[in-house]
Image (spheres, helix red, strand yellow):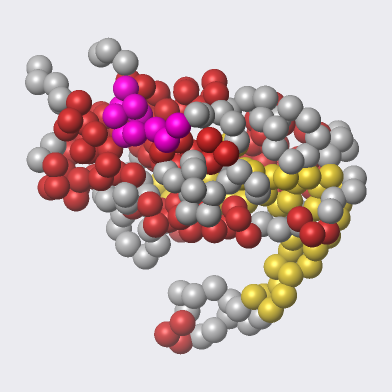
Amino acid sequence: MNRLSKEKRVRVVAALVEGNSIRSTARMTGVSKPTILKLLRDLGCACAEYQDRTLVNLKCERLQVDEIWSFIGMKQRNVPDGKKGEFGYGDAWTYTALDADTKLIASWLIGARNADTAKAFLSDVASRLSHKIQLTTDGHVTYLNAVWNVFEGDIDYSQLVKLYGNEIPGEARYSPAKCIGCKKSPVYGDPDPKHISTSFVERQNLTMRMNMRRFTRLTNAFSKKLENHAHAVALYFMHYNFARVHQTLRVTPAMEAGIADHIWSLDEIVDLLGED
């Protein structure tokens, strides 16, 4: 069986982390689509395992949490009756927790937008922290009970609720309604009003849409399988946290957080595969 050289693997990974689709990556690199998908699967698992081990005992002060929508296989309205309610078909939400100071993605989870997923996600967030933090989420109702159940009140928690005007009809129907204001709502503890914000995590979600083809809206570039979706997200966050220099920080988020001492190269990310 032929194996990809390390140089070819790095070329494939470079294309993927810059937002190219599987098919365009195949055209650019000359590597077959099944081979790219196998590399994505193997490396995605390795990236997820490495970050699970490394992103612990984090000294974050302020976390911002948000969730970003995508879909698997088909839009939710097109899910057949036999698959309705089965996660992995239709809507999929990626929950992200971003350190407002270091811009590190401390945790993420792909799931349904419901109370169980919110609790599981926040439980993972809590397990990675070394001390009490200030947390800001959007106004989604599932966070209220989830934060209380996970942190048991030992947190400075607030919600930033955006207020929207009426939707714009006609040609602008694909644009969101205009935001006409925000309401800062302290919930538990004593959150600092100056740091009640979700701006950084929302901007990072935009970066996700631009750097993962399967998140692009109004195209046919969606994920066909949940597993491939998860592997792509793990690879993206590995590159974002450890290899991509943040424009403001001038270092990577992992370096700013003190969990890496240098900018990772794509060669090093590929080396997570070990000898296979």
200 lies left or right of 37? right
Q: Residue at x 22, y 31 (%)?
A: 9
Image vertical order of residue 176 relative to residue 201, above or below: below
Residue 194 rendering spot, x and y as whole percentages: 79, 59
Residue 237 inside the magenta-drawn segment: no
Q: Nearer the viewer, residue 18 or 153?
A: 18
- Residue at the far top: name it: 275
- Location of the C terminus by quadrant is top left
Indicate whether 227 appears above or below 89. Answer: above
- Residue beneath the point at 60% across and 35% down: 257
What residue appears at the point 85 percent right and 50 percent down from the top-left corner?
A: 191
In the displayed image of the protein, which residue is found farthest to the bottom? Answer: 170
Report x, y in % for residue 168: 54, 84
Residue 230, can we see it? no
Which of 69/241 is in front? 241
* Quarter of the rendering occupied by the N terminus: top left
Q: Is residue 171 left or right of residue 118?
A: left
Q: Which residues are magenta?
A: 262-271
